[in-house]
Amino acid sequence: MADRLTPLDATFLELEEADDSAHMHIGAIMVFDGEGRPAPTRQELCAHLDQRLVLLPRYSQRLSRPYTGGLRWPEWQDDPGFDLLAHVTRAALPSPGGHEELADWASRFFSERLDRLRPLWEMVIIEGLQDGRWALATKTHHCMVDGVGSVDVGTVLLDDEPRRGTRGVRRAVDGPAGPERTTGISGSRIAQAWSGLLPVESVAHAAQMGAHGMMHPREALRGARAALEMIAREELVAAPRTSLNRPIGTHRRFDAVAIPLADLRAIRTGLGGTVNDAVLTIVAGAVRELLITRGELPPEGGLRAMVPMNVRAAGERLALGNRISSLFIDLPVSEPDPARRHMETTARSHALKADGAQAAGTSAVLDLAGLAPPALHSTIAQALYATRLFNLTITNVPGPQQTLYVLGAPLREVYPLVPLAAEHALGVAIFSYDGDAYFGVVADRDTVPDMQVVLDALTREAGDLLEAARSGHDHAAYIRADAE
């Protein structure tokens, strides 16, 4: 049977087709320590990739046609002209080759869409970094893989030993899988789309039948109910309008900051919650700072973030495509006190997880969207990514906590990228690796000329939270005060 795109995978193609400002690729900048040796040549890196990509045939396949629509989804087909050298190029940073030069280069790299007539990925060897370092820039279309899948792909391409050369394919498969992971997508203005295309009765009936014809009726009915509840709730309570949700252009700004993972764990220990709660609180504080410096009053009800959920089964390691769902959390950006903001973020996050209805509703809506034919699905895809449901995307992907290598060079830093949909001017991706959490911030170049405010605030907010955790803030006292 043909390897056809799923409706969810096709969504990321449709978003680009609907609006030139939407760039639906994920990616990363990976910085390596040269340790006195030059960066690999294109031929060396291609020989390395050639041995590994046998496990990932999608990387040598292209779409049967470059656009969606019609009566059938495009299929993945082997590219008869596939050439690794066409996907691996070189670049050099201008002097002095510091962090600023790397961020400027990455901003331009991530502003360019992938060529749909070829396999949908690129890799660039970046030379000229300070202290003898070099980097790899990667860009892969979201229709091929989600954030969790990209981490698993990394375990194939990277080594866990500092040997210069290649290791066997079997060792790549059997390497460390890393900790449990999450990833990110988005969603939005669902009710308008469904009411215009599929009547509520049809949605419920389709769910009862099962999106794939294999669902138990009781489970399907539960999914339909969850989907309808979510549609009604999010249509009634829309995400607030802010300067972060305006028409954007095609050019991006990209930069990143590193926060020690030990600090996030200390925040978790001192203030409760999870590392992800600490991450959300830090981002909330940074966005609050951005709004205030712009003269905007932070929304009292919160700024709504799409936060990812991993639904990839353990047996799906190295499976490409998207296995994702979402939670939508209102970040308390109006709260000035970092400790109180953390307490409120943690409470909201845990309430959503404990209830489970929103996650089930999101998954059900995504499943039901797949029932629409390709000719109509694009309208649904745009509705799922409109600004009514969320203001920004925050994706947190835990990675391996050990040093990895490429051709003997140790990987020191990883700066992750999350896509920006139309009218979403800011996104934050967090990737933890080898003791640090890297906050990759992407923004529209023209709408967010003040992105440096966010970068500075991320570091400051983490420090403020850590200080609160170490000073023994009493959450119970806050709760009593609020009750009074």
Image (spheres, rainbow, N blue to C red):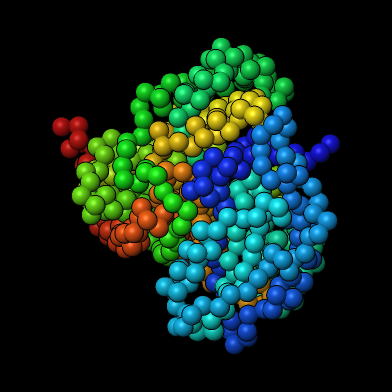
Closer to us: 97 or 259: 97
List x then y, in percent, for residue 211. Answer: 66, 24
Vertical order, 436 against 429 (above or below):
below
Total of numbered circles in the picture? 0
Closer to us: 420 or 338: 420
Q: Residue at x 78, y 60 (%)?
A: 82
Closer to us: 94 or 418: 94
Q: Residue lying farthest top?
A: 201
Residue 320 visible from this viewpoint: yes
List x then y, in percent, for residue 452. Answer: 33, 62
Looking at the rendering, in which quadrant would you find the C terminus?
Answer: top left
Vertical order, 5 against 397 (above or below):
above
Q: Residue at x 38, y 61 (%)?
A: 263
Looking at the rendering, in which quadrant would you find the N terminus?
Answer: top right
Q: Residue at x 54, y 84 (%)?
A: 132
Residue 311 visible from this viewpoint: no
Q: Is residue 102 left or right of residue 171?
A: left
Q: Residue at x 68, y 68 (%)?
A: 88
List x then y, in percent, for residue 341. Answer: 28, 45
Q: Is residue 6 left or right of residue 438?
A: right
Q: Residue lying farthest bottom?
A: 36
Q: Quadrant of residue 314?
A: top right
List x then y, in percent, for residue 392. Answer: 41, 45
